[in-house]
Image: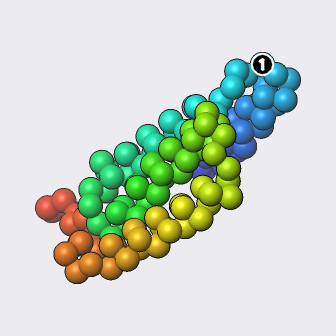
């Protein structure tokens, strides 16, 4: 059986978009924000601390918080985007530390 993830993803996105345009969805900005935060926490929980997750996890969490700040507190994107870029640069510098492992070691007995 071939991988069906792309067609299923397209169907879900298309249905979501259609329902949004038909005004059948409530305001979903808080769901998007929570999704970004949950994805960032999941990256940190699954990959633990490594050079990749130390950048991806916190930046996803920051994007979720920024999305919420834009939606609820009307903070402009002209402030949010530069702040996220600064955070991304700082996280990339932190990831260069030799104290942070390259990636998580595979479980014993697997290669």
Nearer to me, 16 or 31: 31
Q: Is residue 82 left or right of residue 53?
A: right
The number of callouts visible is: 1
What kind of colouring is applied to the model shown? rainbow
Nearer to me, 56 or 46: 56
Nearer to me, 87 or 8: 87
Residue assigned mark 1:
24
Q: Is residue 65 left or right of residue 16?
A: left
In the displayed orientation, state which residue is furthest to the left: 108
Q: Secondary structure at mark 1?
A: loop
Above or below residue 27? Residue 41 is below
- What residue do we see at 33% from left, 79% from top? 96
Position in image of residue 61 (x %, y %): 45, 49
- What residue do we see at 78% from left, 35% from top? 17
- Figure quadrant of the C terminus: bottom left
Position in image of residue 4 (x %, y %): 63, 45
Res. 109 image quadrant: bottom left
- What residue do we see at 24% from left, 72% from top? 100
Res. 48 image quadrant: bottom left
Residue 47 in sight in this render? yes
Res. 28 image quadrant: top right
Position in image of residue 106 (x %, y %): 22, 64
Position in image of residue 53 (x %, y %): 36, 61
Within 10 Å of disc 1 (Cα), the crowding (few <14, some 14-19, many 20+) is few
Residue 111 in sight in this render? no
- What residue do we see at 29% from left, 66% from top? 50
Q: Is residue 98 left or right of residue 25?
A: left
Q: Is residue 2 left or right of residue 60?
A: right
């Amino acid at each position: 059986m071939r991988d069906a993830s792309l067609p299923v993803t397209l169907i879900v996105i298309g249905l979501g978009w259609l329902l949004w345009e038909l005004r059948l969805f409530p305001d979903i900005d808080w769901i998007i924000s929570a999704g970004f935060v949950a994805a960032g926490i999941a990256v940190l929980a699954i990959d633990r601390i490594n050079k990749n997750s130390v950048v991806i996890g916190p930046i996803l969490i920051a994007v979720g918080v920024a999305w919420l700040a834009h939606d609820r507190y009307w903070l402009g994107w002209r402030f949010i985007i530069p702040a996220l870029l600064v955070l991304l640069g700082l996280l990339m510098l932190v990831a260069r530390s030799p104290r942070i492992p390259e990636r998580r070691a595979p479980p014993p007995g697997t290669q």
